[in-house]
């Protein structure tokens, strides 16, 4: 299948075949590092707390600051990319991330590590905000689904594999290597990116600064508040932050409607295919967030397995996505992406419903086929839905669409994590109830996806 991505045909847009190969390697490498670093540190927090002489609650900020800064800057960087050129922003973000990774590896104090993690997140946001839109100009339109399938696979694998890879590195080396490993890989990706990423001329104009500030408060505030609720700390600070986030959202929408050059052109949402794909994506990622947080608790507290075995039992999910994701992208190039996504959501729902039947007496095989079914469904859903989202708008708006895609993914996962924390904190809450909430979220996503299917048919006929 990979060979097909680099074949050339007369009239192809995008890059020549060999250039696509180098550009794809640069994209996969940079995106994988940015996504992995969101989860690779979590398993090392107890070690970091001990070696940096800080409390466990303080160590959590080493992970939180990365997520907060990344979420805050996604929409802003997507808009900035139009002013500086996507290749410059991606290469700059990659260089910034690599340098900050070296700073993290050399850190010997909590404060310095926290600053370096924030700088890492700036570089990650620059890359993640425009990744899918770069695939739009690297590959011919006829291969867009297959290319975005690889992008979805990269993100899904990075999200799922972060903790396992972090544990492996800690098993053979000290914690600075969690970050030092990014340096040689980042330098390789930089060399490839400078060599192969397609050049663009900057579009003159000013950035909507007020819109950017409101988007930063809106996104970072919501992620912070949801994280606090998810960890059982939903006090005054979380409520105030959430209120500020909602106020910023209202102000942001108002400004985007009235400013001449908005940060996020509302023309994006005038396209129903894009709007539906974004909403469907948020509910699907919410359900995945619920499962990714709830299942390890279920395996260890209900079934009584070890943390290592818990990771093994979870492996079928990302493993199957790696197989199904590229295939789903290829199918999306030939058929109706919304229909394929809906089929994937149906299988995902069946897998989630099956997971609610797990209990203390469940055998390992009972877990494996259920998580594998979830992986099949999610892998079949994600790439076609992303293709529908990016492919339904003009090339000029694809960078903004990419920023929205990254934002709804982050928000959906954060909301899913928070819901698990809230449910477990209730007197009647349980892990099974959390999974049922995830099922409800998939039902909403499936209903919306089926509703938008005829719109995708019309889009294919254009």
Image: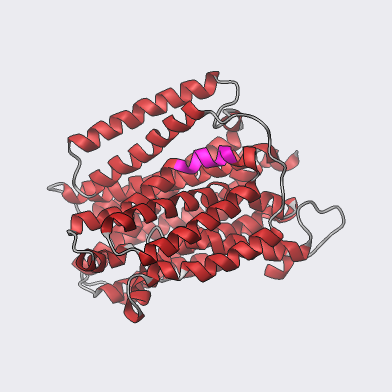
Q: Position of residue 166 (x, y in %)?
A: 36, 70
Indicate left or right for 16 with 449 as reference: right
Q: What stretch is highlighted in magenta?
A: 73-80
User: In the figure, 252 relative to 59: above or below?
Assistant: above
**Percent position of residue 342, x then y:** 53, 49
Would residue 163 be seen by someone viewing this image from the given angle? Answer: yes
Q: Which residue is drawn at 52% across and 51% down?
A: 128
Q: Please say if 372 is above or below 82.
A: below
**Foreground pick, 106 / 377:** 106
Please state which of residues 323 and 264 is positioned toward the viewer in this rendering.
264
Q: Specify the farthest residue to the top.
A: 258
- How did the renderer colour the structure? secondary structure
Q: Which residue is drawn at 25% across and 48% down?
A: 230
Direction from residue 141 to residue 281 in the image, left or right: left
Furthest residue toward bottom: 172
Left or right of residue 139: residue 182? left
Does any portion of residue 447 appear in the rendered image? Answer: no
Q: Estimate the x, y position of residue 321 in percent, counting from the top left.
A: 50, 64
Residue 174: within the magenta? no
Count of marks placed on residues: 0
- Residue 98: x and y in percent read 49, 61
If the image is split into quadrants, where does the C terminus sit?
top right
Q: Quadrant of the N terminus?
A: bottom right
Q: In this view, does 404 lie to the left or right of 85?
A: left
Prevailing SS of the magenta stretch: helix
| Residue found at the far right of this picture | 10
Q: Residue at x 41, y 28 (%)?
A: 249
């Amino acid at each position: 299948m990979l060979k097909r991505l680099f074949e050339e045909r007369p009239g192809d847009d995008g890059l020549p075949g060999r250039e696509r190969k180098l550009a794809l390697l640069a994209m996969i490498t940079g995106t994988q590092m940015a996504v992995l670093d969101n989860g690779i540190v979590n398993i090392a927090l107890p070690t970091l707390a001990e070696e940096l002489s800080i409390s466990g609650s303080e160590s959590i900020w080493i992970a939180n600051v990365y997520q907060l800064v990344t979420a805050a800057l996604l929409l802003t960087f997507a808009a900035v990319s139009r002013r500086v050129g996507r290749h410059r922003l991606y290469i700059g973000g990659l260089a910034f991330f690599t340098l900050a990774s070296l700073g993290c590896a050399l850190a010997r104090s909590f404060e310095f590590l926290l600053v370096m993690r924030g700088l890492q997140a700036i570089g990650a946001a620059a890359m993640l905000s425009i990744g899918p839109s770069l695939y739009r100009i690297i590959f011919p339109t006829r291969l867009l689904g297959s290319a975005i399938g690889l992008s979805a696979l990269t993100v899904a694998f990075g999200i799922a594999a972060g903790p396992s890879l972090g544990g492996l590195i800690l098993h053979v080396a000290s914690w600075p290597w969690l970050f030092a490993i990014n340096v040689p890989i980042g330098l390789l990706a930089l060399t490839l990116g400078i060599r192969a990423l397609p050049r663009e001329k900057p579009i003159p104009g000013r950035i909507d600064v007020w819109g950017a500030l409101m988007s930063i408060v809106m996104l970072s505030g919501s992620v912070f508040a949801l994280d606090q609720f998810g960890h059982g700390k939903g006090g005054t600070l979380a409520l105030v932050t959430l209120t500020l986030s909602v106020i910023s959202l209202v102000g942001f929408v108002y400004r985007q409607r009235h400013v001449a050059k908005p940060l996020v052109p509302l023309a994006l949402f005038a396209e129903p295919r894009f709007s539906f794909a974004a909403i469907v994506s948020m509910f699907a990622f919410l359900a995945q967030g619920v499962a990714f947080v709830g299942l390890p608790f279920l395996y260890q507290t209900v079934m009584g397995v070890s943390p290592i075995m818990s990771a093994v039992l979870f492996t079928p999910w990302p493993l199957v996505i790696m197989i199904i994701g590229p295939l789903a992208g290829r199918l999306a190039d030939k058929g109706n992406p919304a229909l394929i996504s809906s089929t994937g959501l149906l299988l995902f729902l069946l897998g989630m419903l099956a997971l609610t039947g797990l209990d203390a007496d469940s055998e390992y095989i009972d877990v494996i086929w259920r998580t594998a079914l979830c992986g099949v469904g999610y892998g079949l859903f994600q790439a076609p839905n992303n293709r529908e989202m990016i492919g339904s708008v003009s090339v000029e708006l694809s960078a903004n669409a990419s920023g929205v895609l990254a934002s709804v993914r982050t928000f959906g996962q954060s909301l899913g994590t928070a819901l698990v924390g809230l449910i477990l904190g209730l007197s009647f809450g349980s892990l099974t109830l959390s999974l049922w909430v995830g099922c409800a979220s998939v039902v909403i996503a499936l209903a919306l996806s089926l509703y938008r299917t005829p719109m995708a048919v019309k889009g294919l006929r254009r």
